[in-house]
Image: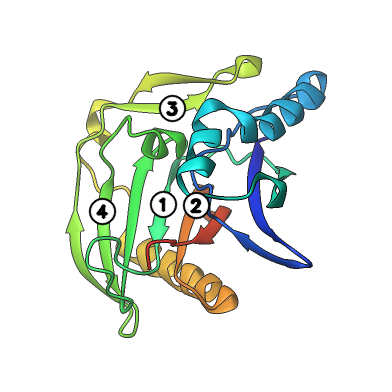
Amino acid sequence: MPIRGGALFGHSGRFQCGFLAGELETYLYVTRSNLTEMVRKCWSSLFTPRAIFYRFEKKLDKSRVSVGVVIQKMVNSEIAGVAFTAHPVTNDRNQMVIEAGYGLGEAIVSGKITPDTYVVDKKEKAILDINISEQKKMIVRAGAKGTKDVAVPKARQSKQKLTGKQIIELAKLCENIERHYRHPQDIEWALEKNKFYITQSRPITTL
């Protein structure tokens, strides 16, 4: 199972989330034997030098910062990635950008690979641009030892990760999430056995 942290900032029942995006630790393939330890480590990542410096730089009152730890079902994804429901470069809210790569999404989030990129027109549900990137390595499960890097089969390295139908299906799902939260979202997703799973969603804080 994966362990993820989500930071909250606020008081009196009014909280802001997503402001510590990328600063808290995530642990994959956690077992019952080390569950308590990993929950503790995830929670305490709020107090790493990196997270403390971030709060200092943003002038956030430490007494108003808290963290929730989420225990999820582990998705053994064949393909995974990130979706931005507003274009992260142009800030165009009518366009969605989807990134996709083989294996676990950690390869994209950590910057180990260059993913495929698909740009979708949200209103017309049309694919505007497809940029396919060669992928030679992917991250997969390594038994009880967490994860490992393995080679992508040569025949798949230069292939498009998601089909056109899958891109539109995922875009519709992500748009529903954006509609629910009433703000553009930075979404992490995974595909296992042709079913999409949403593993994380947080507001795009730069808009």
* Viewer-nearest of discs 3 and 1: 1
Q: Residues within 10 Å of mark 4 (few under 14, many from 20)?
A: many
Q: Where is residue 155 in the image (x, y as percent from the top left)?
A: 23, 32
Figure check: 52 above or below 36 = below
What amino acid type is highlighted by mark number 1? Val
Q: Can residue 205 be seen in this view?
A: yes
Badge 4 vs badge 3, beta-carbon distance below 8 Å? no
Figure check: 116 above or below 44 = below
Mark 3 and mark 1: span between their CA atoms?
15 Å
Q: How crowded is mark 1: few (under 14 residues within 10 Å), some or many (20 or more)?
A: many
| Label disc, if present, on residue 139 of the rendered structure | 3
Q: Where is mark 1, residue-wise? A: 82
What amino acid type is highlighted by mark number 3? Ile
What amino acid type is highlighted by mark number 2? Trp
Mark 4 and mark 3: span between their CA atoms?
19 Å
Element on which disc 1 rests: strand
- Which circle's residue, 2 or 3, is located before the other in the chain? 3
Q: Which image quarter holds the N terminus?
A: top right
What amino acid type is highlighted by mark number 4? Thr
At 26% across and 53% down in the image, what residue appears? 117
At 67% across and 32% down in the image, what residue appears? 42
- Which circle's residue, 2 or 1, is located before the other in the chain? 1
- Which circle's residue, 4 or 2, is located before the other in the chain? 4
Mark 2 and mark 1: span between their CA atoms?
6 Å
Q: Where is mark 2, residue-wise? A: 189
Badge 2 vs badge 1, beta-carbon distance below 8 Å? yes
Mark 4 and mark 1: span between their CA atoms?
10 Å
Figure check: 55 above or below 205 = above
Describe the colour scheme in one phrase: rainbow
| Label disc, if present, on residue 117 of the rendered structure | 4
